[in-house]
Image (cartoon, grey):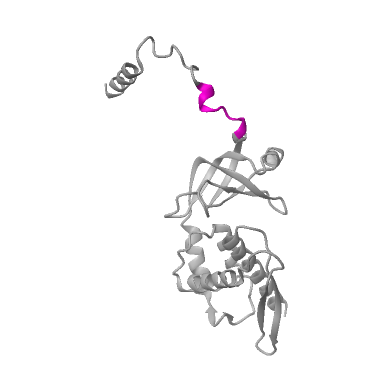
Amino acid sequence: MDEFLLFGHKMSGCLRRAEAVVTGERQQIRYRIAGLETGSAGMTVEAIAPKKGPDRRMEVVGLFKKTVADLQAGAFTDPRWTLDDLRGFRELIAPLKRTKQVWVDGQQLTSQYIANIDKILGSSVGAEGFVSGRLERLNVHNRNEFVLYPPIIGASIVCHFPDELFERVRDAIKRSVTVCGTLFYVPDKPFPDRVHVRALEIHPPDDELPKLRELRGSFRGCTDGLSSVEFVRSTRDEQEN
């Protein structure tokens, strides 16, 4: 029974992750157990329509079921999931030691399910660098992390940071920032999946940045008396030589 309850808890976490991928927001959908089976323990879970906002239950549950099936089959290709999400899906069955079989929506999850996830996690490549975006979703419950949203729809990066950066991270919530550290990439993804942050720069709001017209005349005299055409040509010639 303990493992049955543990599985239900882990499945709830995976459904929350699926909702975050689909909606980009915090959990709105609640679930209830609509049926229980004794003997070979089984349960039927029903998604409850949210009280407000669009009804995305079919998309969320559909994404969860498809992801589980794809991971079991070794056919996972959805770029919206992060490595942290995949670790959550791994925990769906990894802690179950005494349970002989696990089925989700008619799909049996076997040791191959875990092996396929481990293969994806093991392919992550780390490199030193930096990346910019909007800092949101600070989480300090048993971990220090936030989510960085680069300027591309659907992209998100989980960032882990040391305790000494906490105050700076807190000041940066909902601000545009650049983080520097170790970036971990999954093959074929343009942005890193996660970052171990060593430094963080907070950028000023857009309305505090100088306007283009305010820069007029700021660089007067920097061409050493040459016209703009002559200056560009001389710079180009220097680079070619």
Relative vertical location of residue 214 with respect to residue 197 in this rendering, above or below: above
**Main SS class of the magenta portion in the image:** helix
Viewer-side residue, 42 vs 123: 42
Viewer-side residue, 213 vs 150: 213
Which quadrant is home to the C terminus? top left
Viewer-side residue, 23 vs 150: 23
Residue 203 seen in the current view:
no
Is residue 145 found left or right of 153 in the rendered image? right
Relative vertical location of residue 146 with respect to residue 66 in this rendering, above or below: above
Which quadrant is home to the N terminus? bottom right
Which stretch is magenta?
Answer: 207-215
Relative vertical location of residue 152 with respect to residue 31 in this rendering, above or below: above
Q: Where residue 209 appears, x then y in whole percent?
A: 58, 30
Residue at 63% from the left image edge and 65% from the top image edge: 54
Viewer-side residue, 132 vs 219: 219
Is residue 34 found left or right of 229 in the rendered image? right
Residue 121 seen in the current view:
yes
Residue at 54% from the left image edge and 58% from the top image edge: 83
In magenta stretch: residue 70 = no
Q: Where residue 93 appears, x then y in whole percent?
A: 60, 72
Q: Where residue 197 appears, x then y in whole percent?
A: 59, 42
Relative vertical location of residue 73 with respect to residue 240 in this rendering, above or below: below
Residue at 50% from the left image edge and 70% from the top image edge: 71
Residue at 62% from the left image edge and 35% from the top image edge: 205
Please tell me in which quadrant of the rendered image residue 45 appears.
Answer: bottom right
Is residue 101 found left or right of 27 in the rendered image? left
